[in-house]
Amino acid sequence: MRVRAWVVRWVPPGAVAAVWVYEGLVAKLLGARPDERAIVAAVPVLGAAAGVVLVLIGLAEVGLGLWVLTGWAPRTAAAVQTALLAAFNGGGLLFGGGQIAEPLNLVLHNVVLLVLAWLVATRRHA
């Protein structure tokens, strides 16, 4: 495979996957971002289960990153990413807004991620 074709094939999905794996593994499972736990803990219905929910979210995010890398059902993967980010951002802003230092920054970054996710999902292979 030529270098350009390799870059076109792997860099965009790799970038999307890297965000999901970082957010799931590093930020949540390894606890590098305590604000993530505080945001989840701020959801009233979770109570003592917030830690378990955070682990489940982290595992789901890592799984989503791996799914993006496989290239399997890319439009479904993009739709799932859209739904999850809408739910995560909505819940975070609604319940944990005080824990989010820059809410507009959060939303902007996630919109950019979704644009890239949908470009990956709808692109033609090189």
Image: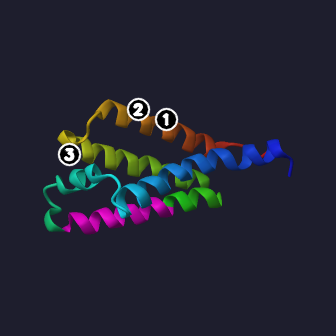
Instruction: Please name the predominant secondary structure of the magenta segment in the image.
Output: helix
| Badge 1 density bin: few <14, some 14–19, many ≥20, Cα 10 Å | few
Residue 102 rendering spot, x and y as whole percentages:
29, 33
Extreme front residue here? 32
Q: Position of residue 20 (x, y in %)?
A: 48, 53
Q: Which mark is residue 96?
A: 3
Three-letter amino acid code of the residue under disc 3: Gly
Mark 2, secondary structure of its residue? helix
The magenta stretch is 49-63
Q: Residues within 10 Å of mark 3 (few under 14, many from 20)?
A: many
Read off the residue under disc 2. Answer: 108
Crowd band around label 2 with a 10 angstrom C-alpha radius: few (<14), some (14–19), many (20+): few
Circle nearer the N terminus (2, 3): 3
Q: Amino acid at mark 2?
A: Leu
Q: Secondary structure under badge 3?
A: loop
> How far is disc 1 from disc 3 in space, using C-alphas?
22 Å
Is residue 67 toward the left or the right of residue 7 in the image?
Answer: left
Is residue 55 within the magenta segment? yes
**C-alpha gap between disc 2 and disc 1:** 6 Å
Image quadrant containing the C terminus: top right
Q: Which mark, residue 112?
A: 1
Examine the rendered structure and indicate whether residue 57 appears above or below residue 2: below
Colouring scheme, one of rainbow, by chain, secondary structure, one colour: rainbow
Q: Secondary structure at mark 1?
A: helix
Q: Does residue 72 appear in the picture of this structure?
A: no
The residue drawn where x is 20% and y is 68% is 49
Instruction: Please say if the residues under marks 2 and 1 sit with CB atoms less than 8 Å apart.
Output: yes
